[in-house]
Image: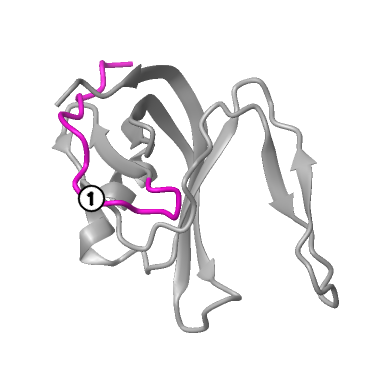
Amino acid sequence: MPDPTPVTGPAADTVDSHLSTLQFCSSGIGTVDTFLPGLDVIPQINSGDQYEDDTDIAAANRSYHKRALPEDQDFELAFRHKPGDASQAAFTTLVKARDSITIKVIRASGEVQDVVFLPQDHFSGESGKESGKQMFGCIGKLQQVAFSTLPAA
């Protein structure tokens, strides 16, 4: 596997409620969408635990159960935009070609998590939550997980 193209510098905007930021690069192609619009899931990289919503439809409160993960951790990214969205075209093309993709997550704490994502599969279908929009996701393997911190400003 070729070395991934590095991401340089922290991202400018936040993409989730935990004030994490996310950047993507690809091997041999250069920078792919710095941000992907409509990102629905920020991955918990090597957190050790993953929780799945198992709330009963009649329940007043939400409930979750812990899900077992394989040692090499399947990894999923979900989007609430159609795959044909021009701003995602480069990324979805890489996923379909199964090219390795570098992902950089910058947490609000300043911790940086770099991983190489190897796409295994992708899907497209109607989202039950918002009619008329499609959800695109890709599932693959995390490789070469590295943790670091942002340099002092």
**Badge 1 is on which residue?**
90
Q: Which residues are magenta?
A: 1-19
In the image, residue 83 sits, relative to residue 25, either above or below, namely below
Q: Nearer the viewer, residue 13 or 115?
A: 13
- Residue at image location 46% in from the left, 58% down from the top: 40
User: Number of labelled discs?
Assistant: 1
64 with respect to 106 (left or right):
right
Quadrant where the C terminus is found in the figure: top left
Give the quarter of the image for residue 99: top left
The location of residue 133, given as percent across then percent down, is 44, 77
- Amino acid type, callout 1: Ala
- Residue at image location 35% in from the left, 53% down from the top: 15
20 with respect to 23 (left or right):
right
The location of residue 41, given as percent across then percent down, is 49, 52
Image coloring type? one colour
In the image, residue 132 sits, relative to residue 78, either above or below, namely below
Q: Is residue 136 visible to the viewer in this orientation of the structure? A: yes
Where disc 1 sits, the SS reads: helix
Q: Nearer the viewer, residue 85 or 13?
A: 13
In the image, residue 79 sits, relative to residue 22, either above or below, namely below
